[in-house]
Structure formats: structure tokens, C-alpha cells
Amino acid sequence: MNSYDLVVIGSGPAGRRAAVQAAKLGKTALVIDKGSQVGGVSVHTGTIPSKTMRETVLNLTGWRERGFYGRSYKVKQKITADDLRARLIKTLDYEIDVLEWQFERNRVEQIRGFAHFVDEHTIEIEKDTGEIQRVHANAVLISVGTRPYRPPNVPFDGKTVLDSDELLNIPQIPRSMIVVGAGVIGIEYATIFSALDTQVIVVEPRDSMLDFIDREIRDNFAAQLRDRNVKLLFGAGADKVEKIADGKARVTLSNGRVLMAESVLFAAGRQGATDTLNLQAVGLEADRRGRIKVDPITFQTDVAHIYAAGDVIGFPALASTSMEQGRIAARHAVGAEAEEPPQFFPYGIYAVPEMSTCGMTEEEIQERGIAYECGVAFFRETSRGHIMGLQNGLLKMIFSLKTHRLLGVHIVGEGATELIHIGQAVLNLKGTVEYFVENTFNYPTLAEAYKIAGLDASNRIAMLEAAQQQQG
């Protein structure tokens, strides 16, 4: 039986980064994955496919040019599901090739098959051929990711009623769609299909969506969606989903309202893919959604030499944070020194339009009782915004009145997930409003919005401080 310093179960962002990190430290690393190709959910059904579909839709529809040429403008008049898949296939082939090369270059071993624990240090692998192989692990990282939550009473068929994995292989673009669930995945796909001129209705039992996003940004985003005739139905869940005649679907809400559409995307949560790991053999237990509890600093489970990282441990469930979690967990697992996870990380939502956030929201700052002021810039105020024909887009920064330090940055609009990194750097370096006022930004760029928002906040802070001095 072969023995390894670190055995990684799952080759998604957390798993592959962990394995490479262990190898770079001179340790032996093995990656076990049930998929036929490396990459995990992120490459095959999650992050890369959904973002590739988004980019394809924006390009083929001419979405970014409609500010100049009108809503009816299109680059390709008749867009098909095959058009969406063509770019996806090329992208995935490239991603897989890069990952395979990284593993080979760093001498990370791979085995394809289903893994489960036999005991605390022994893992059994069932290969597609039926062959059984056992390996010994000094340390283990569980990074199996998640899969779509599929309630038994929802009639999934891959054509009319779909989960987010099945959506990638739809036979044709529907003219109407009901999206059940206003989480990140539901909202991303709802807005992508809306850009294809599909009539979209979003159903969410809660009274709002994406509560971790600053309310002002959410409100701006929701207003843009409603302007595109995307219906947002909050406060009522989907009690019943049915397939009916003529290839259509019917959704009955908890308030009695009945909706009909050509397709239903059920995106009400995801489930950790831990049910086949035989966790009880090592004394571990997953929660009702298949997630594993870990130490938030080391990513160690209740079993000292077993770690978990990525979506399987829950929020924030981002490819970017999963990579860093995997790297840190691997260092702890093989006895190397490791820094604590960064305090501030960017959260990106690849909807149409994009949203991205880093640091505290205005609501969180209010709850903590911190005296603050905001600075806001609209993309239409920038020259680059005019050049690009942007009619929407908003950047908001929040600063401490006492120290002038940046507390949070929140963006909705074109390029939000790229622009956020300027704010992230300033947050982690404990920068102040003066940074944005005193530094030069390329002109014309959307990044100039930081300068505008910084000046807006600086002027407000100066007025408040002057008023306080007069009162004093």
C-alpha cells in the first residue's frame, strides 16, 4: 500500500492548490477525483462554465454596445444553445490542459475513482474499472465540493426542469424561465438568460436577495433587473413544481400564485458531496447540507490530521477563497508555517451586471456603531463610462470618520469584479481616504471612479469635521 504525506480528495480549486503546495514543500501528494478529468466542479459545471457562458452571451448579444445602438442590437441575430457550448468546450479543454501540466510539473500523483475512509489513515479508492486500491495518508484534505440540491418532489428531467449543472447542456434557449432561488447561482443564470431576451421570473421565499451585499448596491442592481423586465418575486417559496403539456412547466407558490414557463431552473442551494466518504469511519460528521465543520484559521477538522477546504465547508464558497484555504490547510497538514487567512477578500457575483464587494457593508458598520461617511461615484460620471456607453454602474466606499480608514468598497456595474481589487489592496494595507484623493489614476478608466468617490467622501468628511470644530 503506497503512503503519502498528503492525500487530497477532490481536484477543485482547494484540492489542486493544496496538492501543489504540499509538493512544492517537498512532500508526496496524491489527488483522488471521481471525475474522468481533473478540475472538479469549478472547471466542469461551476465557476468556469457559468462565467464562460456569461461572456459568450455578452459577446454574441452585443450587450455591451446596446448603450449606443439600442436594446435591439445584436452581434448574432439567432443565438442557439450550440453557440453557447462552442466556446465552453474550448475553454474547458484549455483549463484541463493547464491543470494537468501543473500536476505533472510538480510531481503530484493522481488516481481517478471514488474515495472513502477505511480508518483514520487508510483511504480506499474504487476505480471505474472496478479495481479497488488502498493508500495510506499521513494527512488528508477533504475538498470534494458540492452538487446542486435536488429535492425528491421536484421532477428534474434535464430539459424542462433543470438544476444548474444540467443547464449547461440545454437543447435550446427557452423563451421563458422561472428561477427558483435568488442566491448567487440563481441570480447569475437569471441575468444571463435575461440578456438572451428570455423572459425571467425569480422566486425567493425570503424578503430579499443576496443579503451579504450592501443594501444600496442590491437596490441599484434590482432596479436594473426590473428595468429589463426581470420579475423578482420575494416572500413566497415554490411549493410545487410540475411538468405539464407542450413541454412547459408550472410552479405553484406558497401564497397560491401559479406561474408557467418553458423551463424551470431549480437553484435553491447546494449539497456537500460528502455522503460517500464514510466519514463515520474516522469519527467525523457532516451537517444536513453535507458540510464539514473546520477551524477557520487552520481548516482542521475535529480529527487532528484531517482537514477540509473549499465549498464543502460552506460560506463564502468561492473559487478564489477555496484556493487560499487549500494552500493554508496543506501547509498546516504537512507541518509548515502558515499565515492566517486574509482579513479582507473580494466577493464577486458574475451576474449581468456584475457585483463585487470587499470589507464591511453600511449595515454592518451601523450595527457596530462606527461613525462613518460614504463616497459614491457613478460610472456615467467617468469619461471611460461615456466612451463605453455605460448608463449604469455605481462604486461606493465607506470610511471611518475617526481614522479616515477605508472600511468597505462595493461595486455594481461593468468590470466590478476587476475593479474591486484596488479597494481590496487599500483595505488590507489599512489605507485611508487620502490615498484616493492624492493618487493619480489612469485616464480615461473606470478605475477613475475611485478618485471621484474618494473626493466625494473627503468633501463630506471635511464638512463634518469643520462643523464639529465650530461646535467645539
Image (cartoon, rainbow, N blue to C red):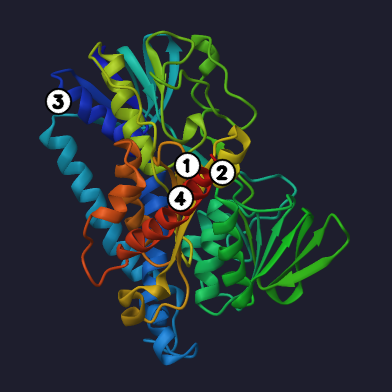
Task: State if disc 2 and disc 3 touch (CB < 8 Å).
Answer: no
Residue 52, placed above or below residue 362: below
> Looking at the picture, which amino acid does disc 3 mark?
Lys
Q: Give the x, y percent position of residue 188.
A: 51, 60
Viewer-closest of 299 and 169: 299
- Badge 2: residue crowd in 10 Å (few <14, some 14–19, many ≥20): few
- Badge 4: residue crowd in 10 Å (few <14, some 14–19, many ≥20): many
Question: Which residue, given by chain and number where applicable, does mark 3 sit on?
Answer: 24
Q: Which mark is residue 401?
A: 1
Residue 253, placed above or below residue 302: below
> Looking at the picture, which amino acid does disc 2 mark?
Gln
Task: State if disc 1 and disc 2 touch (CB < 8 Å).
Answer: no
Task: State if disc 4 and disc 1 touch (CB < 8 Å).
Answer: yes
Determine if residue 196 is in view.
yes
Query: Between tags 2 and 1, which lies in front?
Result: 2
SS at mark 1 in the image: loop
Residue 162, placed above or below residue 120: below
Query: Between tags 3 and 4, which lies in front?
Result: 4
Residue at 48 percent of width and 54 percent of height:
463
Query: Between tags 4 and 2, which lies in front?
Result: 2
Circle nearer the N terminus (2, 1)? 1
Q: Which mark is residue 471?
A: 2
SS at mark 3 in the image: helix
SS at mark 2 in the image: helix
Residue at 48 percent of width and 67 percent of height:
352
Q: CA distance from mark 2 to mark 1?
A: 16 Å
Circle nearer the N terminus (1, 3)? 3
Question: Which residue, given by chain and number where applicable, does mark 4 sit on?
Answer: 461
> As drawn, which residue projects farthest toward the left?
105
Circle nearer the N terminus (4, 2)? 4
Left or right: where 286 falls relative to 302? right
Q: Give the x, y percent position of residue 183.
A: 59, 51
